[in-house]
Image (tube, rainbow, N blue to C red):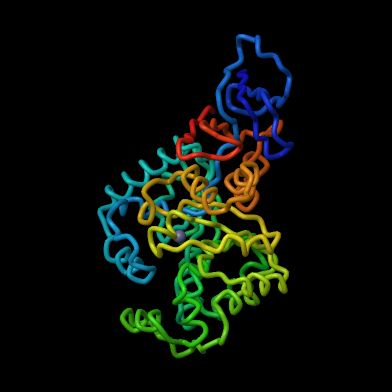
Amino acid sequence: MRRFSADYIYTLDDGVIENGIVVTDDYGKILAVTDEKALLDPNIERFKGVIVPGFVNAHCHLELSHLHKKISKGTGLIPFIKEVIKKRVADEEVILEAMKKADEEMYQEGIVAVGDISNQTISASIKEQSKIKYHTFIEMIAFDAAKSSQVIDDANALKSAFKTPSSITPHAPYSLSKDLLKKLTKYCKKTENKISIHNQENDDENFLYRYKDGPFMDFFKEMNIDTDRFKAQSKNSLQTIIPFLPENQHMLLVHNTYTSLKDIYFTKRFNRKISWCFCPSANLYIEDKLPTFEFFKYTDYPITIGTDSLASNQKLSMLQEMKLLQKEIEDISLEELLKWATINGAKFLGFDKELGSIANGKTPGLNLITNIKKGKLTEKSTVQKLI
Ligand SMILES: [Zn+2]
């Protein structure tokens, strides 16, 4: 049995406890959370700072870990994609080694669960052996409607290689068709299948949907992608795809950098189980632009945080993402920010029975965050994995 105490315990289940004590068994299962002032008990491991549950990284691409520091910054999304396509091919050994290192680093950074995008099966064995819990989203890419049946079959074939939780998902509005979404919705009638889709990561995506024109059309031409079946929609991508996404599945909309207030109001007209995901470091790396965070107050959809991959981030650190968000969103409380980084992601991934909050019976992992001033993270704040 272990007893941890800190200046504050953020349970994210039952409030914040000053000088609280968390009692766990040797495996980290929470046995009690109390505010008893038993500070004289020599068995208490006492820390300066706040104790919070393990972090849930809602969006990552472990497969791209070997591209760390290899992709140019600030070029915009389409050049970024081109560079990733060109550079991602590498020896299996190199990719495996980089993934293992990234997995270990995330664990040391206090991450206990990850929603991870995969295009291949190469990460399957690492996820099986990892101390982190993974949900893998097998990505489908087919702008050409003629290819939708094939990509669903291919995704299902890849999915069968994963022994850890997985589902199939469209990649982004600029790489799907209405036909693919209709077929996916049909597929989702029979199976539980969480969806995680990159949304409005750049403005060219909206332009493509409005006018069937712009840089994406040039990109498709270069890539020999058939666009004949696609028609201009006179509205943003999100407004176009929402009606075709399945009603009965939880879905994560990732990035949302160019999501307008009108788009957000539009989503509310549909009965969809949406969560938002912000990846601010990756947004700055690729587009040098952040979402208008204020807009997202106008929905009650849960917000989650992701690190994205090492192709577009220096470090897979949830604390780093939280620091950035804290700077951008002045009025956010630490408790709310922590919910984005823990319980909301755990709920979306379906891991909340075990993870996401400090509550009896859960095994959420415990992180110590230091150097908090006036209830806010500072540049000097660090994270230490306690259990
Ligand atoms: Zn991504």
- Residue 380 in the figure: left or right of residue 271: left
Counting from the top left corner in percent of width and height, residue 250 is at 65, 60
Looking at the image, which residue is at 49% across and 34% down?
383
Q: Nearer the viewer, residue 176 or 80?
A: 80
Looking at the image, which residue is at 44% across and 49% down?
124
Asked if one can make out residue 194 in the rendered structure from this viewpoint, the answer is: no
- Residue 93 in the figure: left or right of residue 378: left
Q: Is residue 260 above or below residue 74?
A: below
Question: Ligand 1 is in which quadrant of the figure?
Answer: bottom left
The quadrant in which the C terminus is found is: top right
Q: Is residue 294 above or below residue 355?
A: below
The quadrant in which the N terminus is found is: top right
Looking at the image, which residue is at 44% across and 35% down?
108
Counting from the top left corner in percent of width and height, residue 200 is at 51, 70
Counting from the top left corner in percent of width and height, residue 360 is at 71, 31
Q: Nearer the viewer, residue 203 or 311?
A: 203
Asked if one can make out residue 70 in the rendered structure from this viewpoint, the answer is: yes
Looking at the image, which residue is at 63% across and 59% down?
275
Q: Quadrant of residue 217?
A: bottom left
Q: Quadrant of residue 196?
A: bottom right
Q: Is residue 84 above or below residue 376?
A: below
Q: Is residue 166 above or below residue 176?
A: above
